[in-house]
Image (cartoon, rainbow, N blue to C red):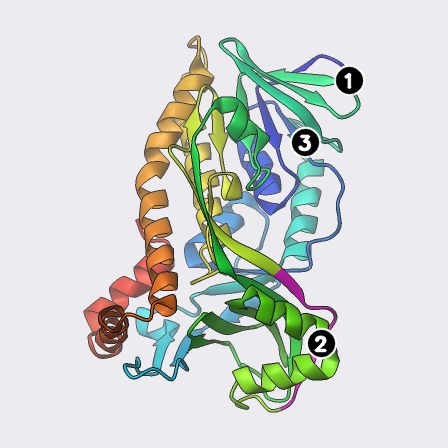
Amino acid sequence: MTGIIADAIVVGGGLAGRIAALAVAAAGLETVHLAPPGPADRRTSALMGPSVTYLEELGIVATPPDFGEPLRRIRIIDATGRLIRAPETLFDSAEAGLDAFGWNFANTALAERCETLAAGLTSLTTVPHFARRVEIADEGTEVTLDNGDSISAPLVVGAEGKTSMVRAAAGIPVREHRFGEAALVADLELARPLEGVSVEFHYPHGPFTLVPAGERRANLVWIDEQPVLEAVRDGGPEALVTALRQKSEGLFGEIRPLGRAFVFPLMTLTVAKAGARGAVLVGEAAHAFPPIGAQGLNLGLRDIADLAATIDAADRTQPGWAEIVSEDYARRRAADLARTGGMVDALFRSLLTEMLPAQALRAGGLWALKLVPPLRRQAFSLGMGGR
């Protein structure tokens, strides 16, 4: 395989990388996808309506989705115990004329669909190796693999997460901020089902969110101080169950963990631009933030959709077409990345702050969303990725 030449190389074996490889190949580029084997991703992804529509267009899910759990309502409960508290707020998809805001999918099922589609695309070659070195020059990108082979292409897509080699090779500046909080994720069985309602209990160090996963199952994302979550995780099953019962305020009866709980430190990551020198960044190579409002993979799918549109619009007979694509892509993505990253960061910090004016502003905002239908509809649009 030494010295393969392609139109595009996609680096990264996660969901964003898999979907990007499909989209780039479907846009007409001879594509090599570097997807080294790794452990199965047992998490789930709550994808909003526009993201689900895009997956339908790519053929990853059926219309309507033939797997996953619909998210029909979002319930927010202020459990901060502060002097100034927000009202309990319920967002119902029916109010927006929708059957559901989105769907909660198992990442393993999405990955399997991607593998099936990839096997049927003659323009897509999947290589089960790591990138050892990425070098970007005026004539294109060369990626050296862990087995010594190399692949060259005018366009390279970095989809390999927060420590992206593609981003570093392109010389794209990145800004990071690490929080003292972390996220605990686990699969649970509840005594009473969620029935299509995603429930968020807002606490001083972040939300405790239960996302419906079918029948009486739920996916938990609990944000709190990292030592608190690690102590709960390491304290044994009884300590975990006691903490879950307390945080859920007993609304769903007895809670039984299904498998292990995992703790992930939280950070924000933003880039100066999402593309340069024939390199483009998608997913967490371009942006990362706390899991608030289910924006992570949704934003990544908007990256991929804009990348495919940029490739479609490009004149690939021009010299330097890949650099033109990367610059055009960066322009297309700039506003969405700034808006979504700023919104999520502001929401998260509004929970953490002890300043009364900020608490009052947050509470007042939720009262307005509760009482003013036009504002609520605008919030629906923004939360679902409206441009």
Range of magenta residues = 254-263
Distance between the alpha carbons at the discs numbered 2 and 3: 39 Å
Q: In the figure, 358 relative to 55: above or below?
A: below
**Element marked by disc 2:** loop
Question: Mark 1: which amino acid?
Answer: Met
For the residues labelled 2 and 1, say whether their Cβ atoms are less than 8 Å apart: no
For the residues labelled 3 and 1, say whether their Cβ atoms are less than 8 Å apart: no
Q: Which residue is mark 3?
A: 34
Q: Could you classify mark 3 by the number of other residues whose Cα lies within 10 Å: few (under 14), some (14-19), or many (20 or more)?
A: many
Question: Mark 3: which amino acid?
Answer: Leu
Question: How far across and how far down the image is residue 132, in percent?
Answer: 69, 26
Q: Which residue is mark 2?
A: 235
The label on residue 1 is 1
Question: How far across and how far down the image is residue 370, in percent?
Answer: 26, 78
Distance between the alpha carbons at the discs numbered 2 and 1: 49 Å
Q: In the figure, 255 relative to 329: above or below?
A: below
211 or 112, which lies in front?
211
